[in-house]
Image (tube, rainbow, N blue to C red):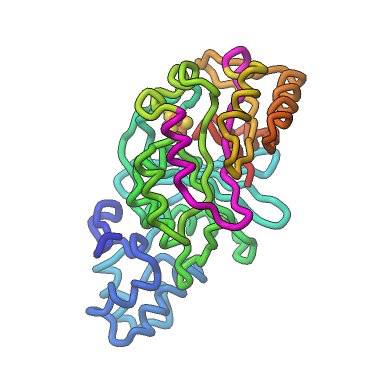
Amino acid sequence: MSESPDTSASDGLPSLLDLPASRWREAMAEWVDAPYRADQVVDWVFRKGVYDFTEMLNLPVELRTGLAQRYSVEPPSINRSFESEDGTQRYLLGLADGLSVEAVTMPYEDRVTLCLSSQVGCRFACRFCQTGVMGLARSLTAGEIVGQVLRLRTELNAPDLPVNIVFMGQGEPLDNAESVSQAIGGLQDPSGPGLSWRRITLSTVGVVPEIKRLAELGAQRPRLAISLNASTDEVRSEIMPVNRKWPISELLAAIRSLSWRTRERVTFEYVLLAGVNDHPEDAQRLGELLRGLPAKVNLIPWNELAGLPYERPSARAIEQFRLQVLRGGLDALVRYSRGTDIAAACGQLHAAVARSG
Ligand code: SF4
């Protein structure tokens, strides 16, 4: 965790959102006359959704002005939004430097899932992913990641609805591991959003050294989803160049090195591409590869994307694949993506994930 807020993403002003809310007292100590003033700011930002110091009405006017000159608590702005027939919303969020990222909200009866971006673009170039075509512009700061949650919650206007977070938007979270870890700390901070690790899922294509380092987060480590998508190195390297650096055996060894909490399971995402990775032998090999892990497999039928050379398997082929994976001793579910009509579905942001909540 860095010692001071980042100044890169807030018009030159340090963003307090880079720090967990419980450290705001310390960060503002020089400027506020009593610690409870910092707590009031936390309350405005995290409970009331007010991001303009001058509107924090229970603070003295001078303090409001002084804080506004020194800090920012402004989350990314909403530039555009698109609503799906199924209630999924896709947002184009504007950052202070003029770049933008996408985030998605998926409402369910008893909760809402927020799909966050960790980078502007991505450098991993998975063949089935539109974000991969963009290349990487830059990584997000911790404050920009926490800010996505604040902005989306304000937009949803449902403060009491439990929130699940998935790092499955643009970017590879473990290619921006430090900021993502800081953001996860901030999201779990009891003075801030106070989310349990169970409500946060990090999806990765397999940046092996960073998977091992996740152990350092201890009780704060989020749930993991691994974007696997193939049962052989040959096919995986073809569709996911990252596999040339960290092949399946190294990826699985890193995952096996982690310790699992009671009832915790690691999700393996598997985008089904007709004729590429949906053979019966693939299903059988999956069982062998994942044996002994507390694993579940999410099978994600490919969503057609213009310009990409893949096809979705038939419904029959998908079901046969699922049954074969089950016979191999693994839990397997077919996850149909949400928001396909607004380009918020798998492959349209971060291909290898299911909007599974
Ligand atoms: S699937 Fe994820 S890691 Fe791969 S190119 Fe797309 S955003 Fe990057």
Does the image show residue 273? yes
Q: Nearer the viewer, residue 331 or 57?
A: 331
Tell me residue 212's x, y (percent).
39, 45
Residue at 29% across / 52% down in the picture? 9
Q: Nearer the viewer, residue 186 or 30?
A: 186
- The correct choice, above or below, for 156 with respect to 305 in the image is below
Residue at 44% across / 34% down in the picture? 251
Tell which quarter ligand 1 is in: top left
Does the image show residue 79? no
Q: Which residue in the rendered view is the most extreme toward the bottom?
A: 34
Q: Nearer the viewer, residue 193 or 56?
A: 193
Q: Is residue 252 magenta?
A: yes
Tell me residue 208's x, y (percent).
38, 38
- The correct choice, above or below, for 201 with respect to 126 in the image is below
**164 sits to left or right of 239:** right
Number of marks present in the image shown: 0
Question: Range of the magenta residues?
Answer: 248-276
Tell me residue 11's x, y (percent).
26, 54
Tell me residue 183's x, y (percent).
40, 56
- Based on the displayed image, in which of its 4 quarters is residue 157 positioned? bottom right
| Quadrant holding the N terminus | bottom left
